[in-house]
Image: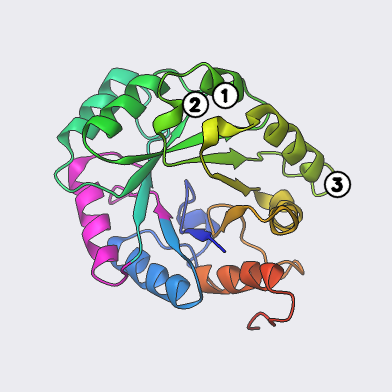
Amino acid sequence: MFVQVCLNGARDAADGAVVPLSPVALAESAAAAVAAGASDVHVHPKTPCGRDTLSPRSVAATLEAIRARVAVPVGVTTGAWAEPDPAARVARIRSWTTLPDHASVNWHEEGAEAVAAALLERGVGVEAGIWSGTDGAARFAASPLAGRVLRVLAEVTDPDPDTAVESARTVLAAIGTAHGRPVLLHGEEGGTWPVLRLAARLGLATRVGLEDTLALPGGERAGGNAQLVAAAIALFRPGLRAAP
């Protein structure tokens, strides 16, 4: 069973104090999530004012803080919102002084191939993000880099709990054999828990964390990433009761 914890995402202080933003807070949250059973960490490094960034200083500070607390792989985002210009995104990656174990690349974004190539050149694993409702799957299917990625992230962006599972099945069908790479399936907001239940039924890797949802399966607000991880693991192990 592989459960990645997505610590913070593009959320900011407006989402509440429970969302970790600083390197110290991220490290603490990562340690608790790994203790709860997370196998891997995905994080969005932040500027001092709380914006997502690919700057080498912020990436290094975040990675070093988390790695001081956990021994599992740690990855970062390369989302276009953190650096809209594709050439600048590649330049940022080439300037990193501390490297993540892996980084997610959203395949529908302009410049995805160049970003993935820059990561691979530096020995960083690539998570190919295939978002529902985009042409990411078609682009990935035609990519010469597809067979070299670490895993494929089937990312269901449909937040409606009534339709998210169907959206998940659609994106999984579009991904197909994923060039033989492992597939991680996850949802977001209201679709998070229905999609995680589907991942459990299909035996797929998944992820959960405050990036994807602020709520536990019953709708209560989560007290942190560890609580979300414990609830996700309980879906994969029906006899296990998630901690309250």
Q: Amino acid at mark 1?
A: Gly
Which is more foreground, mark 3 or mark 2?
2
Q: Amino acid at mark 2?
A: Trp
Q: CA distance from mark 1 to mark 3?
A: 23 Å
Q: Residue 49 in magenta?
A: yes
Which residue occupies the foreground of this view, 183 or 31?
183
Q: Residue furthest right?
A: 162
Instruction: Check if mark 2's residue and mark 1's residue have beta carbons within 8 Å.
Output: yes
From the image, tell me which residue sits under label 2: 107
Residue positioned 66% across, 31% down in the render? 176
Q: Earlier in the sequence, mark 3 or mark 2?
A: 2
From the image, tell me which residue sits under label 3: 162
Callout 2: SS = loop
The answer to whether residue 114 is above or below residue 200 is: above
Residue positioned 41% across, 70% down in the render? 29
Q: Which colour assignment does the render follow?
A: rainbow
Residue positioned 68% across, 67% down in the render? 236
From the image, tell me which residue sits under label 1: 136
The answer to whether residue 76 is above or below residue 24 is: above
The answer to whether residue 118 is above or below residue 50 is: above
Q: Amino acid at mark 3?
A: Asp
- Magenta-drawn segment: 42-71
